[in-house]
Amino acid sequence: MGKLRSKSGSVCLLLAIGVAATVVSLAVAQTDQTFEGKVVGVTDGDTITLLVGRTQVKVRLEGIDAPESGQSFGTKSKNALAALVSGKTVTVRKTGEDKYGRTLGVVLVGGVDANAKLVAGRWAWHYTKYNNDTQLAKLEREARAARMGLWAESQPLPPWEYRARQKAPAAQGTGRYWLNTSSGVRHNERCEHFQKTKKGRLCGPTDGKACGICGG
Ligand SMILES: [Zn+2]
């Protein structure tokens, strides 16, 4: 009996050490995943550059996808993020890296979650392909219902679809494009505005500025 007790006692001790070691390593990992930096660049509504010490670190905001610069609301979305973080010291909670090796993270500025703020402000989509955060999902539902910002358009084109179309222009049928010569916006032939603008002409795939709805 005495022998048994001491054996189970040492098992307990080993377990305790094991748990303690796990807790310590988690705590260290957590600390390493959070860093501060000054925002020295805003690429678009979901990407910023921080100065961390002397190193520039590009951070892609986790869980959101903002309109590209060629899309409607691309510039407004970028400006919204810039107004929030430009020149400020922010905290980044790193969540991982994207396929380009860029840091993915949640950007906190003065206690405000910039990622959530962009979705709530109707300047960015919840990037559901790579993120299943219920709070971001809820914010996007509310933003859509408000029909303001990028949701003011009847069928806003998700940025990921826009990028896919930019990559594969050959997949867009016969590849004819229409340039609205008043606005300088280019539409592809599947767009409701194709050959339907007051002034316009057929054009090449890179003429003018791509339509935010059809992708140009
Ligand atoms: Zn169009």
Image: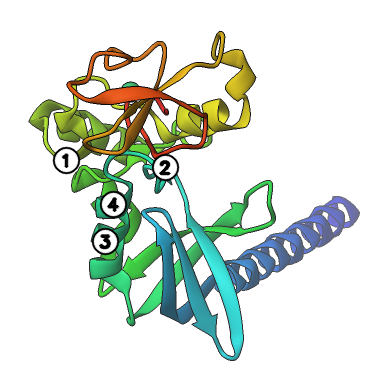
| Residue at image location 27% in from the left, 44% down from the top | 73
In the rendered structure, which disc, 1 or 3, sits on the residue that comes first in sequence? Answer: 3
Q: Which scheme is used to colour this image of the protein?
A: rainbow
Q: Calculate the distance from the C-alpha at mark 3 to the C-alpha at mark 4.
A: 5 Å
User: Local crowd at mark 3 within 10 Å, few (<14), some, or many (≥20)?
Assistant: some
In the rendered structure, which disc, 1 or 4, sits on the residue that comes first in sequence? Answer: 4
Front residue of 179/104: it is: 179
Judge from the rendering whether residue 180 lies leftward or rightward of residue 10; answer left or right.
Answer: left
Q: Mark 3 points at which residue?
A: 79
Q: Which amino acid does label 1 sit on?
A: Gly
Query: Which mark is in front, 2 or 1?
Result: 1
User: Local crowd at mark 2 within 10 Å, few (<14), some, or many (≥20)?
Assistant: many
Q: Calculate the distance from the C-alpha at mark 2 to the C-alpha at mark 3.
A: 15 Å
Whether the residues at callouts 1 and 4 have beta carbons within 8 Å, the answer is no
Q: Calculate the distance from the C-alpha at mark 2 to the C-alpha at mark 1.
A: 14 Å
Quadrant of res 30:
bottom right
Whether the residues at callouts 3 and 4 have beta carbons within 8 Å, the answer is yes
Dot label at residue 40? none
Front residue of 39/67: it is: 67
Task: Tell me the SS state at disc 1.
Answer: helix
Dot label at residue 77? 4
Label 3 residue near ligand 1, CB within 8 Å: no
Q: Which amino acid does label 2 sit on?
A: Asp
Dot label at residue 149? 1
Q: Mark 2 points at which residue?
A: 65
Q: Which amino acid does label 3 sit on?
A: Asn
User: Local crowd at mark 1 within 10 Å, few (<14), some, or many (≥20)?
Assistant: some
Q: Calculate the distance from the C-alpha at mark 1 to the C-alpha at mark 4.
A: 9 Å
